[in-house]
Image (cartoon, rainbow, N blue to C red):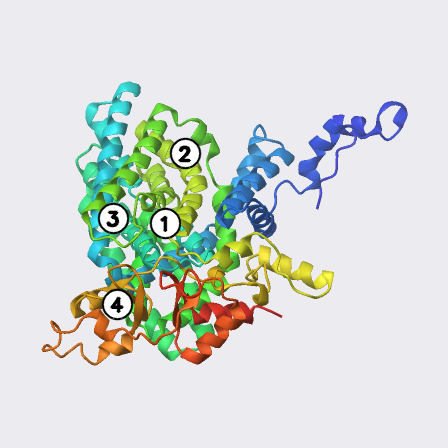
């Protein structure tokens, strides 16, 4: 209920005006707004405003042709600024405190959404997917982590030594170590959301996901190992419990998190096999909400705890490898979690520390620049050394620049358990850098996968216009609102009879030389997510396609391994389709061939392969039509 304006108050006189006539001045309205609005939005109302901000931010992102996550983040930041402006501004400390208290009540929702995202990220460690990239991903990741840590440590150490007065050399080195450990992280939530939004698929996408998963794990392990060791050595002033029992805290944080993640993965796989999907989702939500709440409670009252983020990644990795039909749960989580994910990013935007960005100073600038250089140089170094997939060039480093969820958790841990002025410096630099990297990172992820040819043209077209469909204005309006809220996928801009193969194909194709041995063919098959593989001659012209079933019968015949080449397997009768073929003709081609994938050539009569088109993408276009 709005509070009544006291009779005889200054605001009352301003309302009456001269001569007792009603007169409502701007200052009176501004002073009454907190009362009229009930001081601050309560948690339920605040979450409703957050979802509205998600709709507005999603619409703005679509209009600007940028990833939705940036619109969500800006929507959250705009909501925070609007509430503070309407309810009294920064000077109203009481209102600000109540707003922060109301925002803090949304932490379980934020933890649940982040847990779901990291659980889904753990799926990249599924045996088949991870096997396809492990030949090069460890080489790239090791060099990227080493380069990022080294460059940030040196740059921050030198700048901190020159700018921070009254601090010892060992304290500055400890700060530089922890900043370097935090810089390793690549935001899993932002990266995963962008890749799913643009339906990216291919070896570069798999490489990015695995690099993000590994960097997230290493960041958590490195940071907490360094923090507990430095606390035990007295170089970091921490709470008594952490300083007295650093090894116990470190063991609980790392080994305990892996063990708890293993248990969660096993429990979810059992419930997934024995219970209906709806009940499995209830178990999942309850489990992850309890884990998110328990982490802070144990650390506050026991002096040691597990790491919720690490537990979620491990749990997802275990589940996807041992569960029966694990994809059924992961698809359900992506579908049900879309509004929750949108709310999560708006909440993250609401909590962006813009004030820390303004206070970063030279040390913050050094951190941002050094992390940027370290990531790009490390990836370039790793790609040059490893047997990386095609098109894994310098742009791959751009896809690893997002910086958010994990480093925000590290900053919260540091602010609570790291005493002294260095803790404030660490928090300011870490949170201030998030403002920069979270706004530019998603754009660069999109740029990387689009350049790699792993995003269909039709997916990009959906971002730029409404679906051309018949129906009433009310129907189209309702469908648009559902799309903006993320509850319905946008359809293609063009109807199927006006679209061509080039709108559906992916251009990042692994071509097999005709002279390749059986072992080389199997190596390509192992790394690929497709089941059909074009074979080309020495001039790059198409000679046939290999189906996985064609090599299945000779895999275990050692006498044939060195006698057969890819040309012997290639089916020269397999049809190819030109990139300008209409989708209606493509549907007929799939019916004739009865295959899941067809090679695409640049023109009719040509033999130059430019991509692959999948039957399920074609069916998806027709299924979205009314």
Q: Report which residue position mark 3 lands on.
A: 218
Residue 496 in percent (x, y) is at: 57, 66
Q: Earlier in the sequence, mark 3 or mark 2?
A: 3
Counting residues from the start of the chain, the first of labels 1 and 4 encountered is: 1
Q: Which mark is residue 610?
A: none
Whether the residues at callouts 3 and 2 have beta carbons within 8 Å, the answer is no
Residue 432 bears which disc, if any? 2
Q: CA distance from mark 3 to mark 2?
A: 22 Å
Cα gap from disc 1 to disc 4, whole angstroms: 45 Å
3 or 4: tag closer to the N-terminus:
3
Residue at the outermost front position: 605
- Could you say whether the residue bearing mark 2 is in a helix, strand or loop? helix
* Residue wearing tag 4: 525
Q: Are the residues flagged by discs 1 and 3 in contact, CB closer than 8 Å?
A: no
| Callout in the foreground (3, 4) | 4
Mark 2 to mark 1: distance in Å?
A: 23 Å
Q: Which mark is residue 296?
A: 1
Q: Nearer the viewer, mark 1 or mark 3?
A: 3
């Amino acid at each position: 209920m709005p509070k009544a304006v006291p009779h005889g108050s200054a605001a009352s006189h301003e309302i009456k005006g001269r001569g007792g006539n009603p007169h409502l001045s701007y200052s009176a309205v501004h002073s009454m707004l907190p009362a009229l609005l009930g001081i601050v939005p309560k948690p339920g109302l605040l979450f409703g405003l957050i979802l509205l901000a998600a709709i507005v931010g999603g619409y703005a992102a679509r209009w600007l042709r940028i990833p939705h996550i940036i619109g969500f983040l800006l929507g959250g930041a705009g909501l925070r600024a609007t509430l503070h402006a309407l309810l009294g501004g920064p000077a109203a400390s009481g209102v600000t405190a109540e707003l922060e208290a109301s925002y803090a009540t949304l932490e379980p929702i934020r933890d649940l959404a982040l847990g779901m995202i990291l659980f889904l990220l753990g799926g990249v460690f599924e045996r088949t997917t991870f096997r396809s990239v492990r030949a090069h991903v460890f080489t790239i990741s090791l060099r990227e982590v080493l380069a990022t840590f080294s460059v940030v440590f040196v740059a921050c150490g030198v700048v901190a030594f020159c700018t921070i007065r009254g601090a010892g050399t060992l304290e500055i080195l400890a700060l530089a170590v922890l900043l370097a450990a935090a810089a390793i992280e690549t935001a899993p939530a932002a990266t995963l959301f962008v890749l799913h939004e643009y339906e990216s698929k291919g070896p570069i996408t798999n490489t990015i996901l695995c690099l993000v998963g590994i960097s997230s794990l290493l960041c958590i392990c490195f940071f907490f190992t360094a923090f507990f060791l430095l606390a035990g050595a007295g170089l970091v002033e921490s709470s008594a419990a952490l300083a007295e029992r650093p090894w116990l805290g470190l063991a609980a944080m790392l080994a305990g998190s892996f063990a708890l993640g293993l248990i969660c993965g096993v429990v979810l796989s059992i419930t997934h096999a024995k219970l209906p999907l709806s009940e499995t989702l209830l178990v999942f939500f309850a489990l992850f909400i309890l884990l998110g709440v328990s982490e802070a409670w144990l650390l506050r009252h026991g002096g040691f705890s597990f790491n919720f983020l690490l537990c979620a990644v491990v749990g997802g990795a275990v589940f996807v490898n041992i569960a029966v039909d694990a994809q059924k749960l992961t698809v359900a989580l992506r579908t049900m979690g879309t509004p929750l994910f949108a709310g999560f990013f708006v909440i993250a935007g609401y909590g962006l520390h813009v004030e820390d960005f303004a206070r970063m100073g030279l040390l913050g600038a050094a951190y941002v620049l050094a992390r940027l250089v370290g990531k790009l140089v490390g990836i370039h170094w790793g790609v040059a050394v490893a047997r990386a997939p095609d098109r894994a060039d310098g742009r791959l480093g751009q896809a690893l620049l997002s910086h958010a969820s994990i480093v925000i958790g590290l900053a919260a841990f540091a602010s609570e358990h790291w005493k002294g002025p260095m803790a404030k410096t660490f928090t300011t630099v870490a949170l201030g850098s998030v403002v920069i990297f979270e706004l530019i990172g998603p754009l660069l992820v999109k740029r990387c996968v689009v350049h790699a040819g792993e995003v269909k043209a039709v997916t990009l077209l959906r971002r730029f216009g409404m679906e051309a469909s018949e129906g009433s204005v009310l129907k189209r309006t309702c469908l648009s609102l559902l799309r903006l809220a993320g509850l319905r996928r946008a359809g293609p801009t063009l109807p199927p009879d006006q679209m061509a193969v080039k709108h559906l194909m992916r251009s990042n194709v692994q071509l097999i030389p005709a002279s390749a041995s059986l072992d080389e063919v199997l190596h390509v098959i192992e790394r690929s997510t497709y089941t059909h593989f074009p074979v080309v001659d020495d001039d790059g012209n198409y000679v046939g396609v290999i189906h996985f079933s064609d090599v299945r019968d000779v895999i275990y015949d050692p006498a044939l391994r060195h006698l057969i080449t890819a040309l012997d397997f290639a089916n020269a009768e397999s049809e190819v389709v030109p990139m300008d073929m209409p989708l209606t003709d493509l549907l007929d081609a799939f019916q004739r061939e009865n295959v899941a994938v067809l090679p695409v050539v640049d023109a009719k009569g040509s033999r130059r392969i430019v991509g692959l088109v999948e039957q399920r993408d074609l069916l998806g276009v027709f299924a979205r039509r009314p």
